[in-house]
Amino acid sequence: MVQKIHCIEDSLIMQNIYKRMMNEVNFGNEVIAAYDGQQAIEYYKKLTTSLKSDVESGEIVPDIIFLDLNMPVMDGWEFLEEFSKLSLPESVEPDIVIVTSSVNPDDEARARRYPGVQAFLSKPLTLEKLQTLKATLNGNTT
């Protein structure tokens, strides 16, 4: 089961909606927020440097990242580039789920070139999409 989710989304309203929806479908135990890619990268840099022993145990690294592509400061694409350069142990690398309003069909292919990207979902995120994602990530595709 998913314990910790990192939601990287610039809209406070969407952050709150995601938290309520994840709660409703029992998707995970804890949702942490970042409002742009830079905040998220700083979080992961801190994990990989000052808390190395905790990272290796897997106790503090989120299981899943929900990532918006269009954000100020550092967008989702820049986040993916920077995140791929970090030295998280493979055993604790989170799955990445892109949640975007992009209608460009090339974006999904581009996103899947990054390690860890498990899903590409169009906004709005719905309870049905979240339940399907939960089943897929748990290996139950029915």
Image (tube, rainbow, N blue to C red):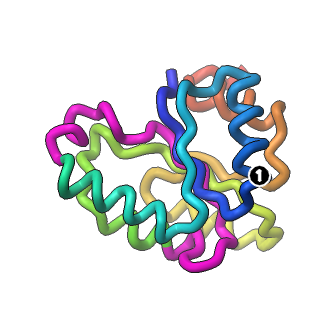
What is the residue that sits farthest to the bottom in this orientation? 73
Looking at the image, residue 118 lies above or below residue 79: above
Residue 43 image position (x, y, % from top left): 38, 57
Q: Which quarter of the figure has residue 107?
A: bottom right
Residue 90 image position (x, y, % from top left): 28, 45
Compare residues 5 and 84 and report the one nearer the observer: 5
Residue 3 image position (x, y, % from top left): 48, 27
| Amino acid type shown at disc 1 | Met
Q: What range of the chain is rendered magenta?
A: 52-78
Identify the residue shown where x is 59% and y is 49%. Answer: 7
Residue 50 image position (x, y, % from top left): 18, 54
Q: Is residue 69 magenta?
A: yes
Q: Sort mark 1 into few (<14), some (14-19) or many (20+) by Cα contacts within 10 Å.
A: some
Indicate left or right for 77 with 92 as reference: right
Quarter containing the C terminus? top right
Identify the residue shown where x is 30% and y is 61%. Answer: 45
Identify the residue shown where x is 39% and y is 71%. Answer: 82
What is the residue that sits farthest to the left in this orientation? 53
Indicate left or right for 98 with 37 as reference: right
Indicate left or right for 38 with 100 as reference: left
Looking at the image, residue 76 lies above or below residue 22: below
Compare residues 22 and 108 and report the one nearer the observer: 22
Q: Residue beneath label 1, please?
A: 14
Q: Which quarter of the figure has residue 49?
A: bottom left
Q: Is residue 7 magenta?
A: no
Q: Which quarter of the figure has residue 27?
A: top right
